[in-house]
Amino acid sequence: MVAERRVGNLPEESNRLVGRRAELAQVTRACGRHRLVTVTGVGGVGKTRLARRVADKLQPGFADGAWWVELSPLSAGRKALPYAIAEALPLADQSTRPMLEVVAEYLAGREALLVWNTCEHLVEDCREVAATLLTVAPGLRILATSRRPLGLPADEEVLTLAPLPVPGTDEDEAADAVVLLAERAAEAVPGFTVTDANRAELAALCRRLEGLPLALELAAARLREMPLPELNRRLDDRYAILGDTDGPDYDADPPWHQALRTAIGWSHQLCTPAERLAWARLSVFAGTFDAEAARQVCADKLLPGQEVPALLGALVEKSILVWEPTGAQERYRMLDTIREYGAHWLRGLDEERVVRLRHRAHFLHLSRTADAAWSGPGQVVWRDRTVEEFANLRAALDCCLAEEDGYAAQELGGALWFFWYACGFSNEGRHYLDLALALAPGSGPARAKALLARGLVAVIQGDGPACIRLAAEFREAVAGDTDDTAVFAAAFLEGVGHAECGRHAQAAEAYDATPRTRPGTGRYAAMWFQLQASSAFVRVNLGQFADAEVIATELRAECARRGEVHVRAWSDYIRALATLALGRAQEAVIHARTALDGKRRLHDSLGIALTIELLASAACTAGDAAQTARLLGLADQIWDTLGTPQAGIPELIATRQACEARTRHLLGDDAYRTAFRTGYDTHLDTGITEALRPPDPSYQAPAQPDPTG
């Protein structure tokens, strides 16, 4: 039996979907008939879980995958939805175009399902983006979950999800609400089963909570602390039920379901005062967070830091937090509805601003630490950590902008230069840095670092004129600064600007005007590595291959001493370019494979694509046309997500065109298309693994037929 091909990023299901057979079939059918389906319903009714199961069922029918886009961490009014879609696809576009335009172009010729989860706070943005995407992408379907419709009457099918059926007076234990409650109770209390003795109490609890899944799950967690009859009695006690003005329902749109208010409010009252305070303060996190972040944000005189780990454990036990162990550490998250409740109480305590500023301060400190460590042995770890924390980093940047604190926005955006530049987030970096720089003109270290970060975005986006302009602005911002590493940053931006405009000799002059030896410490010391790599690359474009090899080899040795991966991989790439041009093809392949391994470790899509094309050029030189075509196809799979093939570098574009022309000539058009498609359709991880594998020593490239016959 052949397994169904599944493409996408659908999250793992934590437990099985109880009931919902009719709703599952209804939503699935609707997605077949309508291009936009919105599942609405009150908070806690199970919209997310149902959408996840529908997407899983539909996924094999979409050639280009089913993609989950989590909207809950996004701030309203920031127009971040296109970036979130791009991140999910993943679409690491590195052009200067608006991200919505990039996403629309990418989806235009594809058959894909987008699942937008938790849209209610971004309804206007969702409506605008959906209208654009559905117009240009006929093969696109969107499944959304929201407490209210998106408001596209001509295109939108709205299905309202009701709570689970509850038993009548006959105590029907087969009712879906009872089944869910019993399953979750067994998870909370091992050995729990439905018996004649507890059947009536279970049915009564389901009726009291009106079959609302989240309310039932919260109630099941209480069985760790009290028997079922006591739980029912406490729920019926008006002291344990939220009053008419208690809880976040007055300003909710639409209002909260009474059963949910009852269950969450009762869970809140069963918490200790310290647990309630932690719940409120933890609501400022976006996405997931670790214990140290929780301690930094929550701890003060009222909540000592040493108590935070135990509080996290207690909130997990009460199902207020979800525990998510990862390979390196434990992380936590809150369900959206529970976070909303905590945020309401945080506002009631008049602590929202101070806790959000603590959150911002923690992630600014984290970014500074990553910045300082970037050019050292922890580079891969910091790359992965920053990606993992990006929802919170984005929230911290949004906090800076909401406070109109341009200095803090520049400080945070500038500290994240490596993330915008080397981790595939240049488009979103440009968005935040432009806002930050406009908010606080002037000079100073924070603005200088933000200008450098914005210049690095221009570097990766191939915007030469912007590089030169930002180099001049950077020089003005650091005028009078005693940090002698600033010269490397300015020269790097200026040199790349000239190179991207085709002025390689001027680029070389800019680089040669700086010291060749590595500087000591300084805010811009990492730019020495970038400058040396660019200097070597410019020599390749000037035809000075021996000089390029020398610079790249010396640079690689320096990177190896420091444990640096990003620039070391670029130095290996440049050594491969130089040695291939010097006629040492086998040596070039070794360097290219080493570069590819480094780029793979950092998930550097640009570096991976360029290195795969370099391996294709080497295969072409060796006469292996079929392998060349496969590698070109694999590279194009990445270029389609980057937006600017060959990074827009004319010399690399010419090399690619020559390689493709020669390979087509050797194979013939039909055989070329077949081999190319094989590479394009190969899973990227598999393709990279195959490209890294040395060939069998006994292998010889097959003789190529003469396509002319």
Image (cartoon, rainbow, N blue to C red):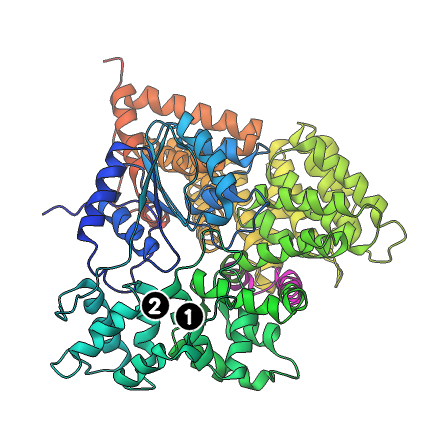
Q: Position of residue 14 (x, y in %)?
A: 30, 64
**Circle 2 sits in a helix, a strand or a loop, which is it?**
helix
Q: Position of residue 431 (x, y in %)?
A: 63, 42
Q: Nearer the viewer, residue 377 or 205?
A: 205
Of the pair 187 and 367, the residue shown nearer to us: 187
Residue 326 on the magenta segment: no
Q: Is residue 370 left or right of residue 573?
A: right
Q: Residues within 10 Å of mark 2 (few under 14, many from 20)?
A: many
User: Residue 190 in the image: x percent, y percent?
Assistant: 23, 82
Question: How many numbered marks have been drawn onto this rendered protein structure?
Answer: 2
| 373 magenta-colored | yes
Q: Which residue is located at x 53 percent, y 83 percent?
A: 273
Reading the image, the residue beneath label 1 is 264
In which image quadrant can residue 537 be found?
top right
- Residue 366 showing in the rendered view: yes
Does 614 sit above or below residue 553?
Answer: above
Residue 32, quarter of the rendered image = top left
Label 1: element kind = helix
| Residue drawn at (65%, 56%) of the image | 399
Mark 1 surroundings: few (<14), some (14-19) or many (≥20) residues within 10 A: many
State the residue in front, 591 or 134: 134
Residue 552, compared with residue 370, is above or below; it is: above
Residue bounds of the magenta highlight: 361-384
Q: Quadrant of the C terminus?
A: top left
The residue wearing badge 2 is 215
| Image mark for residue 402 | none
**Residue type, label 1:** Ile
Q: Is residue 709 left or right of residue 687?
A: left
Do residues under tags 1 and 2 come within 8 Å of each other at their CB atoms? yes
